Image: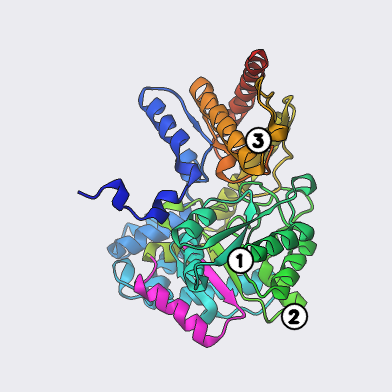
Amino acid sequence: MVKLTDVNSKLLKARYAVRGKIVNRAQELEGKGHKIIYCNIGNPQALKQKPLTFVRQVLSLLEYPALMDSPEAAKLFPADAVKRAKTILGHNPSGTGAYTQSAGIPFIRKAVADFIHHRDGIPADMNRVLLTDGASKGVQAAFTLLTNHENDGYMIPIPQYPLYSATIELYGAKQINYFLDEGAGWQLNEKELNASYEGAKKAGINPVAIAVINPGNPTGALLSHENIEMVIRFARKHHLAIMADEVYQENVYAPGHKFVSFAKVMHDMGETEATLFSFHSVSKGFLGECGHRGGYMEVRNMSDEVYAELVKLQSIGLCSNVDGQVVTYLMVAPPVKGDESYELYVKERDGILGDLKEKAGILGKGLSAIEGMHIDVPQGAMYAFVRFELPHPKGSYPAKMSPAELQKYGAARDEEYCLRLLEETGICVVPGSGFGQAPGTLHFRTTFLPPKEDILALVEKMKAFHSAYTAELKKK
């Protein structure tokens, strides 16, 4: 029997907070009949978001093509859904049950390139697009490609999505933290980037890439054009690859703001040296098709020889799942005006995005009104990273703690807070320490994906809980 001491030590060290101890406890409580408001993970359809009709119609036809030959098909499916399914089968006659080309079905890769071209007004090459099992597999592929020596390191934002810290641990690389500027709306700070880079070099670490999440997870922040320019200049100066996680690009709620891609800014700058990996996914936006595990990675500024190694890596896993490739295609090439499905598609899309925007406002305004809590209305994505304050127990002296001691002290406190919150209110959020936070601060990450009535209930329950919890600590 394999013992824990036999297990890969890198796996033992890896942590993935959004599915950790608190979530396990939430599932136990739910099994005992408690109502749980799950705000721990960006899993829209698990939280009652309905799938888009057009996507599921096309998938149904592809999974059982005989439906298209049925006389009832015209009554069950709109003409453009049938036509789209036939088009897909024309390009991929073997259907959804056979392996595809390692990089993905060519016409879908071409559709992705066309999507990028129309989104940004810049050239895009289908031969630099790989279809992946969600954005996560693309991110892991980039780590595999770039990690060459045990002292290679990756600059990642703090707070960050723990896919990055966990993958770094699994691959035996080094984590290089750079803190996002909470006081400036979670933008990147050039002085902080330089300090982070120089600190890594002094520690004998070789930085090879910088990861950026835009819109932010867990912060919900949207990066400005100027901020992205700064990151690209920084990466070029230090010969770093850029890993641009852009899976929330459709989730922008702040009036007067819009998503700007790293590819667009890089093209406008005429940058041809810094390698860029851009990631997108069908799991977020308004599709919420997490279970279909579809996505793509676009690469810029990479030689043919190196790109061939990336394709070889993809071929080791044969190909990404075919249904995921199809959903990726439907994401980048949706119904257009004049199609029978267009009006329903737009209604469902705008309904989902409008609902998310409303709930972001309810959450942001509601929690920021609670004494001891600090949060701006999220500009994008599906999350808020809420800072909260707690009185210190008598006999504790945070000012005398080292940074490492302060981090450990804070992690124990925010985990205890989130666990008590779950036990007493049924609200399941993730401690900020699971994403990283500045020493001496406390946060939790919450989604605003649950139904509106649950978000309203969350705000009220949080207000009562935080007041009572703080009062209890003051007595100790």
Closer mark to the observer between disc 1 and disc 2: 1
Considering only order in the chain, which callout, 2 or 1, is on the residue closer to the N terminus?
1
Please give the residue where the numbered disc 1 appears in the rendered image.
Answer: 204
> Residue 264: x and y, percent?
70, 71
In depth, the one of 81 and 389 nearer the eye is 389
Corner quadrant of residue 174? bottom right
Considering only order in the chain, which callout, 3 or 1, is on the residue closer to the N terminus?
1
Under mark 2, the amino acid is Gly
Please give the residue where the numbered disc 3 appears in the rendered image.
Answer: 442
Q: Which residues are magenta?
A: 294-320
> Residue 260: x and y, percent?
71, 63
Under mark 3, the amino acid is Leu
Q: Residue at x 59, y 67 (%)?
A: 278
Q: Which mark is residue 270?
A: 2
Q: Residue at x 44, y 78 (%)?
A: 311
Q: Residues within 10 Å of mark 1 (few under 14, many from 20)?
A: few
Q: Residue at x 67, y 24 (%)?
A: 392
